[in-house]
Image (tube, rainbow, N blue to C red):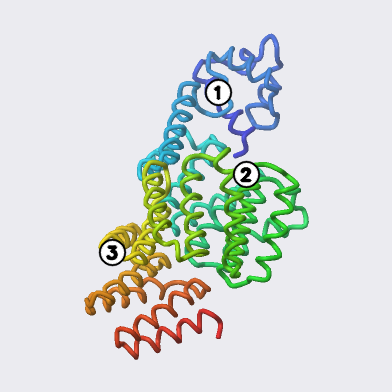
Amino acid sequence: MTTTDLVGLRIKTVRRQRGLSQAQLAHPELSDSYVSLIESGKRTPTPAVLELLAQKLDCSLSYLINGVTAEQMEDIELALGYARLALENGEVAEARTRYTELLANNNLTGLTALRQDTEFGLALATQAGGDLDGAIAILLRLREEELSAERRIEIAINLCRSYRESERLTEAVEVAERILNASARPAWNDLLVELGGSLLAAYMERGDLLRARQFAAELLNAADALGTPRSLVAANWMASNTAASTGHAAESVSFAERAMAVQLEHGQPRSVAIMRMALIQRRFKAWPSEAAAARDAMRQAFVEHEQTSTSTIDRARVLVELAVAEAMTGELDEAVEHAKTGKSMLPQSGSALGAEADLLLGRIYGAVGRAEEARQHVASVHDSLAPLPDSRRSAATWYATAETMEQLGDSDGAVDAYQRALACAGL
């Protein structure tokens, strides 16, 4: 049924409940034939006529338009606000529960915009909780509906991110290019630059480094022309990622610092916390001799993460990176604790970050002579990587795993890991 049909049906239902005929409802301002056409969905009443009919029927205008009373509408909007607040505060499970309860509310059925807001919020909460397949399913279903241009781009951004986190890189690229390469694409704006940033990340992980460098320059030009904080942060951060992936460490840090400067002035605490940790990581990789300073900075940044609304995956990533810095400075007990905690927050299989945590644990245990535990963790790398599609990240992890297996005396396992690394690299 169309919106006009539903409005007409509600008018007809309330009129009959009030014991009125069409003529009685119409008199004296309207004709009974006009009321009949409205009730049958053949005429769309103007706002003034709707307000008049609501007064004559002694019901709320909100009910005639949306199928709910003003009080019910207020309750729905309040519940949606609480769900959003829970998600912003990092209470992911709470947010997911609230969004799910809202979708079960029958009063939401006819409220298309609010129902779409709720479904999109549920997708974000599901994504933040690490259930990427669940988030993808919600976003794909929502994408098939009639949406505003802004919501369609937001869905594409989060679909691209979820596919990328799942190592489904071809699908990540297709989702973003479907909008960015469209002939009728609008002029650059903040959302499109963010979508471009997600696409750029997928290019890099897929190994399209030349395309990534070219597209990074295009995004920087677009952001500089817009001059908005949101676009400048997104474009400079992705330029930093691209420079890091192509071996330009100092350039990577320069772009990251520019993005951080804008983020500190305009960003939310969650975004600042994520970027601060990533900037420390950039500096650590550019100047590994300063590992102790990086470790101390990461410890402080981890506290900031715990105090803000970062997602489960964000916190897991911080813990694994902190473990790497601690291992490099000889703080092996702390490195093991943080790597294990980070890994426990991730799926048991199909996680590149989980594989990196296991590999780190395998190397630490191997270094202190606990060979059996080392072998167990290195073997677990297979469980995390095997379900994932081929990517540069997986290739690098397989290669590092092969080297570790050689050190542990597992020649057959090392050969298999080298072969998987070559396959991931397309060789």
Q: Residue 409 appears in which quarter of the rendering?
A: bottom left
Q: CA distance from mark 1 to mark 3?
A: 58 Å
**Is residue 33 visible from the viewing direction of this image?**
yes
User: Compared to 231, does 55 lie above or below?
Assistant: above
| Residues packed near mark 1 inside 10 Å, few (<14), some (14 to 19) or many (20 plus) | some
Select label 2 or label 3 by which is in front: 3
**Which residue is label 2 attached to?**
230
Residue 247 image label: none
**Which residue is label 3 attached to?**
336
Select label 1 or label 2 by which is in front: 2
User: Label 2 amino acid?
Assistant: Arg
* Picture residue at 40% right of the left edge, 38% below the top: 86
Indicate the secondary structure of the residue bearing disc 2.
helix
Position of the C terminus, as image quadrant, is bottom right
* Picture residue at 48% right of the left edge, 35% below the top: 108
* Picture residue at 43% right of the left edge, 57% below the top: 294
User: Label 1 amino acid?
Assistant: Ser
Mark 1 or mark 3, earlier in chain: 1
Whether residue 185 sits left or right of residue 244 in the image: it is right
Position of the N terminus, as image quadrant, is top right
Q: Position of residue 65 (x, y in %)?
A: 58, 27
User: Compared to 207, does 344 lie above or below?
Assistant: above
Q: CA distance from mark 2 to mark 3?
A: 37 Å
Q: Is the Cβ of the residue at disc 2 closer than 8 Å to that at disc 3?
A: no
Residues 7 and 266: in front is 266
Residue 62 image label: 1
Mark 2 or mark 3, earlier in chain: 2
Q: Position of residue 178 (x, y in %)?
A: 67, 60
Whether residue 345 sits left or right of residue 237 in the image: it is left
**Is residue 131 visible from the viewing direction of this image?**
no
Indicate the secondary structure of the residue bearing disc 1.
helix
User: Label 3 amino acid?
Assistant: Val
